[in-house]
């Protein structure tokens, strides 16, 4: 892989992740990843022509079987290296319909999904994949939100072609 420069631009890999909490039960949505990777957040690669918002919604449906409403942004991560860039948008969401049940039939997107308490996630954190968590992010974000962590408004993250905000 060659280094990028100003003449050719920088290859950028973008991902959307979703931290989804049930508004009534206060449980967290976890996806059982394929390929023995364990339990993690719904999310995925932003395809060309797509954006972070639609990717977050699509990936949550595909991986967890849950239609969501994005409620806010937890974090935007961006890094530039000599061989390219990486950007991740981490959203906070709730199910569009609280009566929806998580996906139970395995396919190429995931083995299924489940609503879990923070205590259940902490227990899974002690285990190695595939029974345990793929990484600590779901536990970290669930703990952050349960302690009153800031959820930023969605309009903090806009398409670069959006009109500037005007007063009046």
Image (spheres, rainbow, N blue to C red):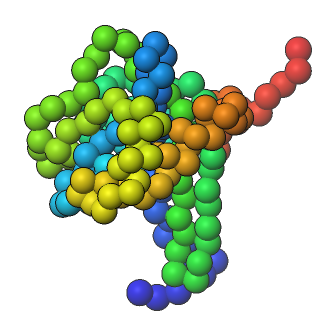
Image quadrant holding the C terminus, namely: top right
Q: For the point 47% across and 55% down, which residue is it?
A: 136
| Front-lying residue, 128 or 58 | 128
Please identify the quarter of the rendering in which residue 103 is found: top left
- Residue found at the far right of this picture: 168
Relative to 21, say whether 60 is above or below: below
Q: Nearer the viewer, residue 161 or 22?
A: 22
Q: Who's the residue at 37% across and 33% down the image?
A: 116
Which residue is found at the position 43% from the left and 17% from the top? 25
- Say left or right for 11 vs 61: right
| Rendered residue at 62%/61% (across/down) | 78
The relative height of residue 16 versus residue 98 in the rendered view (above or below) is below
143 is higher (above) or lower (below) than 65: below
User: How far across and how far down the image is residue 95, in percent?
Assistant: 40, 20
Q: Is residue 91 left or right of residue 150?
A: left
Q: Position of residue 68 (x, y in %)?
A: 40, 24
Residue 15 visible in rendering: yes
Q: Position of residue 73 (x, y in %)?
A: 61, 37
User: Up-down: is 10 above or below 123?
Assistant: below
User: Which quadrant: the N terminus?
Assistant: bottom left
């Amino acid at each position: 892989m060659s280094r990028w420069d100003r003449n050719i631009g920088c290859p950028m890999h973008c991902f959307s992740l979703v931290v989804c909490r049930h508004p009534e039960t206060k449980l967290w949505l976890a996806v059982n990843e394929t390929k023995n990777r364990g339990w993690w957040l719904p999310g995925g690669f932003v395809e060309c022509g797509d954006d972070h918002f639609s990717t977050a919604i699509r990936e949550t449906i595909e991986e967890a079987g849950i239609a969501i409403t994005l409620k806010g942004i937890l974090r935007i991560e961006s890094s530039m290296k000599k061989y390219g860039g990486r950007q991740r948008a981490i959203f906070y969401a709730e199910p569009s319909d609280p009566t929806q049940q998580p996906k139970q039939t395995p396919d190429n997107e995931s083995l299924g999904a489940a609503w879990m308490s923070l205590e259940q996630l902490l227990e899974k954190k002690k285990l190695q994949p595939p029974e345990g968590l793929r990484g600590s992010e779901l536990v970290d974000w669930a703990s952050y939100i349960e302690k009153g962590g800031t959820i930023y408004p969605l309009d903090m993250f806009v398409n670069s072609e959006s009109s500037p905000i005007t007063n009046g």
